[in-house]
Amino acid sequence: MRKYELVFLVWFLSACGSGDSYQKSLLPVDSEDLTTEDLTTEDLTTEDLTTEDRLIPADPGKVGPYQVLSYTPTASATGYKSAIIYYPSGSFDSLLPATTLSGGFTNTKEQMSWLGKHLASHGIVTIIFTPTTNTAGSAQIWANGHRASVNTLQSENKQARSPLAGKLNISRIGVAGYSYGGAGAILAANQLPNDVAAALPLCAYQPAKPTSKIPYLFITGTRDTVASPTQVLNAFKSTATGQPKAYARFNGLTHFDMINGGNYHESVARYVTAWSLKFLADNAAYSTYINGELAQKQAADKRVFASASDYIYQE
């Protein structure tokens, strides 16, 4: 059993005894190795824990606590060929954040389903699209898809028959994409400065300079020979918007690891999900995975990053 799961279980037991409530964002707890019958608050109390320990959320690289449902949006759009929306099942006390997502050259929406489902399991509504043409040599094609997807989310929130009617926080929509889709996400954020709250370009191919005043997470890999990690780093360095930004160059990651069947999905999902929960869901607890103790541990792990300088976080 991992440390933070044990910590949460102890805190949960203590809270139940005192009448305190818990937050959904801190679930789930994996208790395969230890059940509530094995541990009482007499064994370890919250006084033994630091404040940071009590607030460490479950690993965002793992599947989240929510059952995931999906549907084809009813709103028509001219900016993409097709789209699917993944969303968490259940009732929620607050409006849900959302993000767009796309693959790159020749990719379809189905090839990015792994990440869309993962984000939705953590409470982040995700619309994945296939662009109008996925063999074009222009990132603007994917930018059009991101822009149309943002519009679709806004429309779905208004339509009474939509499963997401009235459930979305339309002021907290992100854009995320891989390869040309990542370059398109940057362009879409530049073109929709008032509608996009965060951007996550993944192995972006020939990325433009970001100009929108939002948080950016740039992901690349040491073995990406298609989308130059140097170009991604330069895009990161050129981002001077006064908002948080991060550069993550995963050890061994290739360009094609981002699609279904690729490697390093857990590591990529950990940062993408933590970034989304922090900046789209306004959940400060996930800061530890971005610029806190757990981020420092990851940066020092050569299985994740070949060098500590391969992960950079700046505000």
Image (cartoon, rainbow, N blue to C red):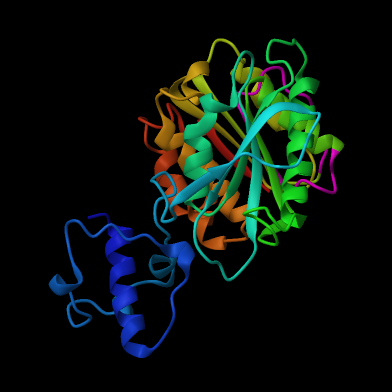
Q: Residue at x 53, y 29 (%)?
A: 112
Reply above or below: 48 against 294. below
Q: Is residue 27 left or right of residue 249?
A: left
Q: Which residues are magenta?
A: 192-212
Q: Residue 245: name its quadrant.
A: top right
Q: Position of residue 101 (x, y in %)?
A: 63, 34
Q: Position of residue 197 (x, y in %)?
A: 73, 49
Which residue extends farthest bottom? 18
Q: Position of residue 212 (x, y in %)?
A: 82, 41
Tell me, yes or no, whether the highlighted magenta stretch contains residue 201: yes
Q: Is residue 298 visible?
A: yes
In this rendered view, identify the residue nearer to me: 198 or 114: 114
Reply above or below: 123 against 108. below
Tell me, yes or no, whether the highlighted magenta stretch contains residue 68: no
Q: Residue at x 35, y 30 (%)?
A: 303
Reply above or below: 45 against 300. below
In this rendered view, identify the residue nearer to me: 154 or 27: 154
Which residue extends farthest left? 38
Q: Residue at x 54, y 43 (%)?
A: 70
Q: Quadrant of the N terminus?
A: bottom left
Q: How many marks?
A: 0
Q: Is residue 109 left or right of residue 23?
A: right
In this rendered view, identify the residue nearer to me: 178 or 305: 178
Q: Is residue 223 visible?
A: no
Secondary structure mostly taken by the magenta-highlighted segment of the chain: loop
